[in-house]
Amino acid sequence: PQMCHGHTAGVRQALFTPDQRGIISSGDDCHLKYFDMASGQEAWHATLPRPSGSLEMDREGRVLTLAYGNAVGFFTVDR
């Protein structure tokens, strides 16, 4: 299996992008990461104020919805 490394604490969630070219993950380290499936390398990341509790992406792969603490965030994904 292909492994993607980069979180410094436990991974809470991971999902494939709709085009199956990437994986987006969130972890206890308060990081949101995008891994490119072709290379297995981290392509971008964001730091959150607290670990996420929910992670979803729209069908087109353009908007990532993230719930963390008492907030909901909407991220536009540019790949």
Image (cartoon, rainbow, N blue to C red):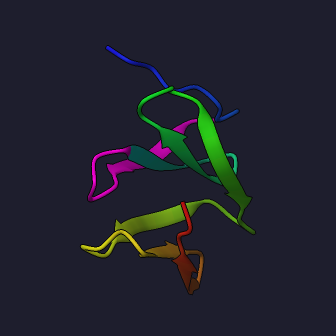
Q: Quadrant of residue 76?
A: bottom right
- 7 vs 73: above or below: above
| Residue at figure coordinates x 58%, y 30% from the top left | 41
Q: Percent from the top left, x then y, of residue 66?
A: 49, 73
Q: Quadrant of residue 78?
A: bottom right
Q: Is residue 9 left or right of residue 23?
A: right
Q: Is residue 78 left or right of residue 17?
A: right
In the rendered view of the protein, which quadrant contains the N terminus? top left
Q: Quadrant of residue 3?
A: top left
- 24 vs 5: above or below: below
The foreground one among 26 and 57 is: 57
In the rendered view of the protein, which quadrant contains the C terminus? bottom right
Q: Which residues are magenta?
A: 9-21
- 12 vs 2: above or below: below
Q: Percent from the top left, x then y, of residue 59?
A: 24, 73
The foreground one among 77 and 46 is: 77
| Residue at figure coordinates x 41%, y 67% from the top left | 54
* Mark count: 0
| Residue at figure coordinates x 62%, y 37% from the top left | 42
Q: Percent from the top left, x then y, of residue 48?
A: 71, 65
Q: Percent from the top left, x then y, of residue 6?
A: 65, 31
The foreground one among 3 and 72 is: 3
